[in-house]
Amino acid sequence: MTGLTASTGTEDTFPVKGMDAVVFAVGNAKQAAHYYSTAFGMRRVAYRGPENGSRETASYVLESGSARFVFTSVVKAATEHGRFLAEHVAEHGDGVVDLAIEVPDARAAYAYAVEHGATGLEEPYELKDEYGTVVLAAIATYGRTRHTLVDRSGYDGPYLPGYAPAQPIVEPPAKRCFQAVDHCVGNVELGRMNEWVTFYNRVMGFTNMKEFVGDDIATEYSALMSKVVADGSRKVKFPLNEPAVAKKKSQIDEYLEFYGGPGVQHIALATNDIVASVRAMRAAGMEFLDTPDSYYDTLGEWVGDTRVPLDTLRELKILADRDEDGYLLQIFTKPVQDRPTVFFEMIERHGSMGFGKGNFKALFEAIEREQERRGNL
């Protein structure tokens, strides 16, 4: 299994094509699919359930550009897989169980990962139907999260064998709200961030892309530490957070408490028009974190000109940040379930490959205001 990284031209020991799917275990997949169709403008493309042979689970596949979400709930937990999903929802609430990665060779990727210390969950196997063949394998990562390794180069069906094509649940918007998964953020326990960074370095050949520690990522009351690992092409990026000692409970502490352990904290979605996306999502009922007007009073002094006028950024509460490569625009939703766990980020990049370092203080203060309202700060 060899390849060349786009960024360095050196040999890539674990080549990837990109994120294949973000798979959620939820209490009611039908309702979740409707919510993400309505609030996120996603299009249902495939379904598997009792009507087409899946007696234990129901799964809805939604897409927006290359971004793919799969929502699965248990109809009747009769096997180990069904019991795992039911227990996962009972323990963690709605959450991500799988960050599936598309690879050119699932067998080689699995062999490399296990040889370098990964815990194998499913050895490579094939699924076939009239659309072709998919090769799958799975390894464990932090908490109860897994990475399914997907080789779909010989397949042109709607998702995977066993899934039937499905019509949209609601009429998708004329302009999609986002076109790709930009990055997926994991929260781990105090003292374990470096352990998982090393895991991705060793097991998947990922390299360290960014590091935020100390004052980079702290407020008066709470703090955390974060490091970002990515594949050689930068198509798959995984920031990893851990709490840091501070006066009060950090957002990572709150997540770990309410999720019941480590897991996926938020998913960043790449958009080409964050203004249109935020307007459409707000109109559909999506709630975003608020940002005080004072943030915008000096924003232009250090960010400079952006595609979006400052008055529009202020109106929509969109954040901006600039680094040596360009700038980005971003905004964060509130948690999308009753537990203060999983949320989303909308991000529009213009050269910058950063993660909004200049916004950390404003963002975390906004999160702290929500924590205080919940009585969890």
Image: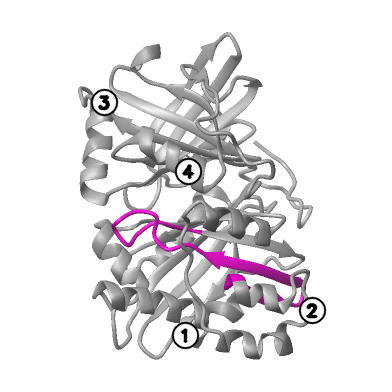
Q: Residue 32 appears in which quarter of the rendering? A: top left
Q: Which residue is mark 2?
A: 305
Assign a secondary structure to mark 4: helix
Gap in angstroms between the C-alphas marked 3 and 2: 52 Å
- Name the residue type under label 2: Asp
Give the residue drawn at x 56%, y 85%.
293
Q: Which residue is mark 1?
A: 214
Frontmost of labels 3 and 1 is 3
Q: Earlier in the sequence, mark 4 or mark 2?
A: 4
Gap in angstroms between the C-alphas marked 3 and 1: 46 Å
Counting from the top left corner in percent of width and height, residue 45 is at: 55, 27
Q: Total marks drawn?
A: 4
Assign a secondary structure to mark 3: loop
Query: Which is nearer the eye, 140 or 12?
Result: 140
Quadrant where the N terminus sits is top right
Counting from the top left corner in percent of width and height, residue 310 is at: 71, 78
Label 4 neighbourhood size at 10 Å, few (<14), some (14-19), many (20+)? some
Assign a secondary structure to mark 2: loop
* Residue 102 seen in this snapshot: no
Gap in angstroms between the C-alphas marked 4 and 2: 33 Å
* Residue 36, disc: 4
> In the image, which residues are magenta?
316-344
Left or right, residue 3 beside residue 251: right
Q: Earlier in the sequence, mark 3 or mark 1?
A: 3
Kindly check if marks 4 and 3 are in contact, taking CB atoms under 8 A apart as contact: no
Gap in angstroms between the C-alphas marked 1 and 2: 29 Å
Left or right, residue 339 beside residue 346: left
Q: Earlier in the sequence, mark 1 or mark 2?
A: 1
- Name the residue type under label 3: Val
Label 2 neighbourhood size at 10 Å, few (<14), some (14-19), many (20+)? few
Q: Is residue 151 covered in magenta?
A: no
